[in-house]
Image (cartoon, rainbow, N blue to C red):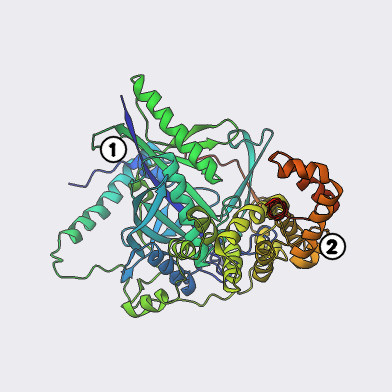
Amino acid sequence: MPIDIDIAHVAKLARIELSEQDMASYRAQLGVILDHAAKVQALPTEGVQPTSHPLDMVNAFRDDVVTPSLDRDEVLSQAPDATDGFFRVPPSLDNE
Amino acid sequence: MNWEPVIGIEVHVELETASKMFCGCAVDFEAEPNTNVCPVCLGLPGALPVPNRKAIEWITKIGLAFNCSISERSQFHRKNYFYSDQPKNYQISQFDVPVCHDGWLDVTVAGATSRIRINRAHMEEDTGKSIHVGDSGRIHSATETLLNFNRAGVPLVEIVSEADIRSAAQARAYAQDLRTVVTALGVSDAKLEEGSIRFDANVSIRPVGTEPFGTKVEVKNMNSFRSLERAVDYEIRRQEGVLESGGIVHQETRHWDEGEGVTHSMRSKEGSSDYRYFPEPDLLPIEVTDEWRDEIAATLPEMPAARALRYVALGADGDSASSLAGSEALATLFESAVEAGAPGNVVANWLTGEVTAWSRRESLDVAESALTGKHLRDLAAMVAANSLSSTAAKEVLGYVLAGEGGPAEVATAHDLVQISDSGALEEAVDEVIADNAEQFARLAGGEDKLIGFFVGLVMRVTGGKADPRAVTEILRSRIS
Ligand SMILES: [Zn+2]
């Protein structure tokens, strides 16, 4: 039995528009992934260190030294729209 | 019903490192837009972040200054949300294991000290800056948004208090004291008006004597301590009004409008789970060993509260001591003046009075003035020797601040030196007595109000440079 997902909410958070048909198929596909995660979650992990990284390393830092940035014209030339050294985008109000 | 406000404060502090948090782009807010950007801070595909060691040292320093425990191991998370000033569509932040946790800051309002617990201080990165362009200049009616990513990726420390604050005045005091500490640490210029330190308040109210928290509202957009206090005060009264009239306080974010003096609703707050935090796979855990932590602790400067106590012992009154301890420039002058032998109380009054007023009036930092500790010592010595009246001393201070020269030089140039040579003064008094023998006989006969007449004459004869108290004394000695 696949885990139930509020696929419309997930789509909204990801800012993608889905048809009814897409929703049904993604719901099923994501359900399989969640099923798998549930299986992993059920494993006995008593005494196992939580890990978020495959490497057993810590503290890969850099010194606080300034390195050259990119050329602005080159940067802005990659954007759909720019003006006066700024990126120009549609009015952004909120997360709605 | 009587309501009790319950307030927590979130503070964002931009660190003044040379380079950004995860890339080598310069931290420079004066720069032309989008000139300090690279694949990492623009969130281009394949770019890999590498944390700035100094930022980790500095957040540890901040944590230690606020009495926090330092996590031996902490980790970065991705906080996912869409907003155009956030190039990666996620912010690298920290979630369940921040670098610093469980600290406190003692705050005093009207003589009452309260301990405000600090839940955590975590490391994250700042966003870019948006300029909303439109007819009215208001965000709601903007027609387009311009983006500058120079600020994107600047190291940002978020300091989150517990909901231990109980009044708008206390909220302000907490914010001010916190800023003073951060400034003393030298990790941020912490300027409210420029946004390098930002305060948000979580405000709710509950009936006095009850435990459960009410629904909290997040208030943003306060760019001075005064507006923070006003905004919190307004929000408390607004919620009281809503609840008293049988309404419901909604969990939301509200923006403070300084001009109108009200808060406006912005949007429903997304639930924490909507940010879909997950461990940042591109970054390794951070380990602050006891050894590293102790090394950082050894670099902590004297904290403002401790410094203020020391200044009280040097003669400053409590309020002046706090003001002096909160300003590097004033503190430096106070210490060098006292070290040079000036009385602490006199110097503290000048520094928190005339000198601070001068700095405001001229919009200049005191450190940019010509004033030195030795000047203050010399000025105090002139007052003590009666060669300057205390009023004239303030005037002299103004000229010294303006760079006209040392106190003695300036006082002479502006003809402010009092006759302190008692011989010269006695001569002047005797001359006036001789010229007004009849009036003096009446004074000697008990007509005491004539003393003012004589003092006035001596002042006139000396061109206003006599010390009236000294003149009075001499007159009295001539009567008896
Ligand atoms: Zn960069």
Separation of residues labelled 2 and 1 (CA atoms):
66 Å
Residue at left offset 40%, top offset 58%: B78
Where is residue B419 drawn, in percent x and y? 77, 61
- The residue where tag 1 is placed is B213
Residue at left offset 38%, top offset 24%: B242
Q: Is residue B35 left or right of residue B186?
A: right
Using the image as rendered, state which of residue B2 and residue B68 is in the foreground. B2
State the image quarter where residue B339 is shown. Answer: bottom right
Amino acid type indicated by mark 1 = Phe
Using the image as rendered, state which of residue B181 and residue B265 is in the foreground. B181
Residue at left offset 66%, top offset 56%: B355
Chain of residue at mark 1: B
Answer whether residue B463 is visible to the viewer in this image: no
User: Dot 1: few (<14), some (14–19), or many (≥20) neighbours within 10 Å?
Assistant: some
Per the image, label 2 sits on a secondary structure element best described as: helix
Where is residue B58 drawn, in percent x and y? 46, 69
Q: Contact (CB < 8 A) between labels 2 and 1?
A: no
Answer whether residue B177 is visible to the viewer in this image: yes
Using the image as rendered, state which of residue B247 and residue B464 is in the foreground. B464
Chain of residue at mark 2: B
| Disc nearest the viewer among 2 and 1 | 2
Per the image, label 1 sits on a secondary structure element best described as: loop
Q: Tag on residue B413?
A: 2
Q: Earlier in the sequence, mark 2 or mark 1?
A: 1
